[in-house]
Amino acid sequence: MTKINSPDPTPAMLRIAANLRSLCHRSRLSQQDVADVVGVSKQMVGRWTQCTSTPDAIQAAELAKLFRVPLDVFVCEDVSAIRDSDLEEIRDVARLIKRWGYEKTHSRLLGAQETVGEGKANVQRADDEKPARPRRKAT
């Protein structure tokens, strides 16, 4: 965390705060949701959105990863061009991260793969349910 000692924040600090506020609002994530995923307090996220402090490099990278934007875009550009439909998915993923942790969520989401068997596509679920068994052909 970088504490701002000067009364005038830099343009990059203002951009990070504006992007974080926008992405949280549009994805309907609370400051607590973001704090849980990044591993900081709710108050710290509030300071970031109010531009009284800024996330360090690792925290900024975690925020960019959460909102699925490149780090340079999150820090330097306006994120208003991101589609709202993309942000809806982020809210669901953030809730999974809170439930399972980042590594487990990442592996479960990547584990949801499509398998093809007997001419039909079967989708295996990445959650705790067992996949349905394929039916055997009558001989």
Image (cartoon, rainbow, N blue to C red):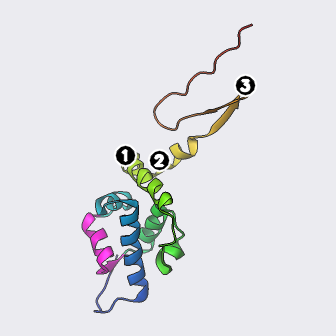
Location of mark 2 (residue): 105
Q: Is residue 43 magenta?
A: yes
User: In this rendering, would 23 be left or right of 52?
Assistant: right
Total labels: the figure holds 3
Residue 15 shows which numbered tag?
A: none
SS for callout 1: helix
Give, as a three-letter code, the residue at label 3. Answer: Glu
Q: Is residue 57 above or below residue 30?
A: below
- What x and y, as percent, mark residue 12? 43, 84
Location of mark 3 (residue): 118
User: In this rendering, would 97 be left or right of 40?
Assistant: right
CA separation in Å, label 2 and label 3: 30 Å
The residue at the point 48 percent across, 73 percent down is 79
Magenta-drawn segment = 41-54
SS for callout 3: loop
The residue at the point 42 percent across, 74 percent down is 19
Give, as a three-letter code, the residue at label 1. Answer: Arg
- Residue furthest left in the image: 43
Location of mark 1 (residue): 99
Q: Nearer the viewer, mark 2 or mark 3?
A: 3
**As rendered, which of 113 and 101 lies closer to the eye?**
113
Q: Is residue 15 magenta?
A: no
Quarter of image, res 15: bottom left
